[in-house]
Image (cartoon, rainbow, N blue to C red):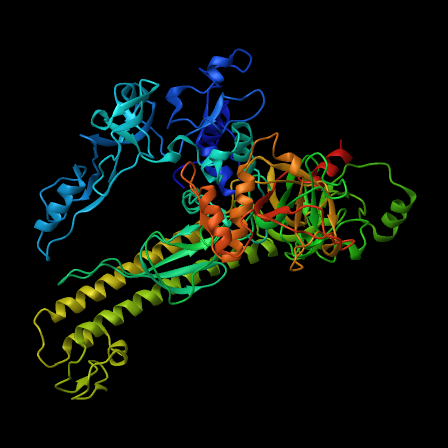
Amino acid sequence: DLVNAKPVMAAIREFFGSSQLSQFMDQTNPLSEITHKRRLSALGPGGLSRERAGFEVRDVHPTHYGRICPIETPEGPNIGLISSLSCFARINDYGFIESPYRRVVNGIVVDEVKVLNPGGSNYKVGDVITRAELDKALAGLGPDKQTIENEAHSDYLSAWEEDKYIIAQANVELDADGRIVNDLVNARQAGNFVLKHRDEIEYMDVSPKQLVSVAASLIPFLENDDANRALMGSNMQRQAVPLLRADAPYVGTGMERVTARDSGAVIICKRSGVVDSVDSERVIVRVEGSSHEGQLSREVGADIYQLTKFKRSNQNTCINQKPIVYQGQRVKKGAVLADGPCTDKGELALGRNVLVAFMPWRGYNFEDAIVVSEKLVKEDYYTSIHIEEFEIEARDTKLGPEEITRDIPNIAEAFLRNLDESGIIRVGATVKPGDILVGKVTPKGETQLTPEEKLLRAIFGEKAGDVKDASLYCPPGIEGTIVDCKVFSRKGAELDERSKSILESQVERLHRNLEDEKRILNDERAKRLTDLLQGKQVLADLHDEKTNKKLIAKGTDLTRDVVEKLRARDLKRMRITNKDLRLNEQIDEIEEMTSRQIAVLEKITDEKIAKLRKGDELPPGVIKLVKVYIAMKRKLSVGDKMAGRHGNKGVIARIVPEEDMPYLPDGTPVEIVLNPLGVPSRMNVGQILETHLGWAAQALGVHFATPVFDGATEKDIKAMLSKGGLPTSGKIQLFDGISGVPFEQPVTVGYIYMLKLSHLVDDKIHARSIG
């Protein structure tokens, strides 16, 4: 209460609203979020304008290598002006982009590490040493000394520094000792490509994917795609809507796990331990501290991870986390505890793997149109959840305050059946256009009375019509389920029933968390005391100080059950076999530590509860603000836009019954039919290689990672196909589902990872109906 929140909020709002480059975060899926945060722009204050930027500015430049992605940039007027940071690039203190390189000395690659914790060695924190020096230092440390904590280190160079050196590519062949195998090596020097002797090489690239951005590094077989289509592919992955069930791609690039983790969509374990309990809303991990001989570990207690349930993102998609660990499971720091939107067991999963055939189908997949099987609709392959937010506020007006109420004039009881006594719709109700979401009445001025109102006035003697209906109704095009309601009341105002119940549930959740944390701390206390006193015997009867009641008999063995029942001061008075002088100190230390931790937790919880009960900062003149959230299921429908990861986009033209789709010799109907004419002219052959490898992956029951510029070759794909018992050509005889006649030629069949994009036909029809 020391700070008035309103001016602070106003200052923050003004700061974020003042710059042209301050944007509303793109939260369609985790990838769009992470790429939006890594966006670079040449527009804005102090930059260029679209009209004045020529070709030179927009073009790819040699210094972009490893710093700015040459692929990911928007199509249209902003092309080349807005770009994305490459995978390993970073921005230095002077605002220049740097890229990492590995040092090469006399033809041998030097592996360097950075010291994070010197342990028992003579190094300092931040020292950079070679791997050989580290191994030597580790060998010199005794077994009782603490080891040296370290991380891999690369030299970061800016574009000017890079010009001075001769730099080899990442795919140079090395032997076991890190020596370059070939005498002559392809290298870069001041932006030119040269052939150099291995002893002249000074640096080499870190990884083949260091020149592309995060979105482009998620495209398998990127090296086989034309750049224009790769650009569309990386841009369209950002528009994929989170589906009901995420499904990791059969053919990935190995960057899926890294991207999901770094986007913040999944919940990461902060400290190692054992999962104590799991439910849909939270995961509790009992922390196991690292213990050193003779001293207590301070790292005890519980980490409680609250999961986000059915929250609305900025783009109206649904953010929902679900746990993937089970009770009693041991988890390490950095492990994934819960999946978020578009993730499957901690891997980014933007779409679904579907069985595709490349062939025309009765003219329906002409010009990039897509024919899909009804199975995809029936089994909810591409069903997504969208959450809309509606709000209504009750204000002070000249004629008196507006009121949120169930008591609305001239509305039949049937229309109010889903409203509670406060006039707010209940969570779980199904709504359709025209339903009342929140009832509100607003006072109206003295007007000419109708004869009916005059009659009512005469009978009841009070103003029957001094308020009019100003309720929040469900708008057209919205049909779904109420998933949440939030009520904000002015500070000091009387809370209605709904606000009270919401507040009580929040307080109850905080109390439940506190009880769990206390339980785990008390368990830990009992365990530590048992470890101290395990296997010892009581030498004399122990009596209560006040009541003189016998607490424990002579000769009792101290087990956990016995120790748990006794208080610390009783334990200290007890006479036991070979009692150590330090024992009482240790008991005190354990007790004090536990009680201190519990006191801190209770204080934090009390502060949180006080904050909840305080009321909300609302704009001037607003008494109460109600927000209602409606979740809608969108099934796949004709007119929806779909795409693969190689820029192969299209619109659904027809949804065909399963039995009419072309089928394989074993009777399996294909799920999607794509037009083969979409491949040659666009030169995105990556989709065909993905089709073949995906088919092999499905047959073998495995997932493949084929990294960018370092992926599977045609030979590898053929080997995998034959290992899975499939034709190495990747083609097979298909049969017409309608007539049962075999098609004239074998058809390319396999599994492609297809995404549903956020251009949904329902939104467009709605937009056309309201102009």
The answer to which quarter of the image holds residue 335 is bottom left
Q: Position of residue 376 (x, y in %)?
A: 66, 52
- Camera-side residue of 718 and 417: 718
517 over 160 or under it: above or below: below
Residue drawn where x is 13% and y is 63% of the image? 294
User: Does residue 657 appear to the left or right of 96 in the view shown?
Assistant: right
User: Does residue 354 appear to the left or right of 333 in the view shown?
Assistant: right
* Quadrant the C terminus occupies: top right
762 over 504 or under it: above or below: above
The answer to which quarter of the image holds residue 501 is bottom right
Q: Position of residue 223 (x, y in %)?
A: 47, 34
Residue located farthest toward the right when viewing the structure as drawn: 451
- Camera-side residue of 157 and 228: 228
Q: Is residue 342 visible?
A: no
Residue drawn where x is 57% and y is 47% of the image? 730
Q: Position of residue 267 (x, y in %)?
A: 42, 51
Q: Report the label total.
A: 0
188 over 271 or under it: above or below: above
User: Does residue 305 appear to the left or right of 657 in the view shown?
Assistant: left
Q: Position of residue 562 (x, y in %)?
A: 25, 81
